[in-house]
Image (cartoon, rainbow, N blue to C red):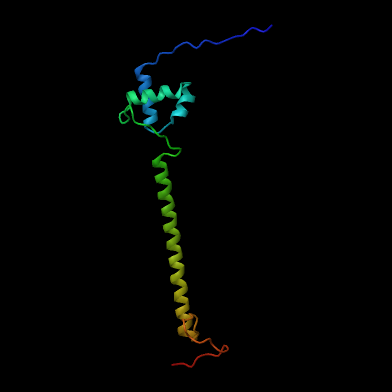
Amino acid sequence: MKTKVAFIRKPRAFSDEFKKEVVKCFEQGKFSVSQLSRLYGLDFQLIYNWIYKFSSFNEKGCRIIEMKESSTSKLKMLEQKVKQLEQMLGQKQIKIEFLEKMIEIAEKDLHIDIKKKSFTPQSIGSSKRAKN
């Protein structure tokens, strides 16, 4: 017959300095509550209680919502995306200006109507226009 072995979990006492350090790690965004819970082997509700007690900006009765991505990292990511899009837009604008200049030169020097204007009759053949 197997004997049942049960581990009795003794209550642990934590110093206020330790509790404040855990809350500080949370407030600075270094760790989430679930990460702190796994790191120190603490119940997440215990950590929330410490946050309500020792936090400089959280109050009892307020709900703490943790986002997967912190707002600062999301803001940095969005700023980087805006920078990339502005760079791409600048490159496209340069390309457009280059192509428009090429069309202008071709129309001027080669007397070829490259830009199709609306409501103009379709050209007949590839004969050159008379010089002005």
In front of the other: 50 or 82 = 50
Judge whether 80 appears above or below 52 on screen.
below
At x 39% / y 28%, what residue is drawn?
25
Q: Taking 49 as reference, is 35 left or right?
A: right
Q: Residue at x 45, y 75 (%)?
A: 100
Q: Which of the 4 quarters of the picture holds residue 26?
A: top left
Left or right position of 66 against 54: right
Q: Give me the residue at 64% from left, 7% from top.
A: 3
Q: Which residue corresponds to the image point at 41% horizontal and 39% vertical from the top-left?
A: 70
Image vertical order of residue 118 relative to residue 124, above or below = above
Q: Quadrant of the N terminus?
A: top right
To which quarter of the image does residue 56 belong?
top left
Residue found at the far front of this picture: 61
* Total count of labels: 0
Q: Position of residue 125 (x, y in %)?
A: 58, 89
**Whole-percent x and y of residue 59?**
31, 28
Q: Quadrant of the C terminus?
A: bottom left
Find the residue positioned furthest to the right: 1
Above or below residue 89? Residue 4 is above
Please tell me which residue lies in front, 24 or 119: 119
In percent of width and height, residue 13 lies at: 40, 13
What is the x, y in percent for residue 8? Answer: 52, 10
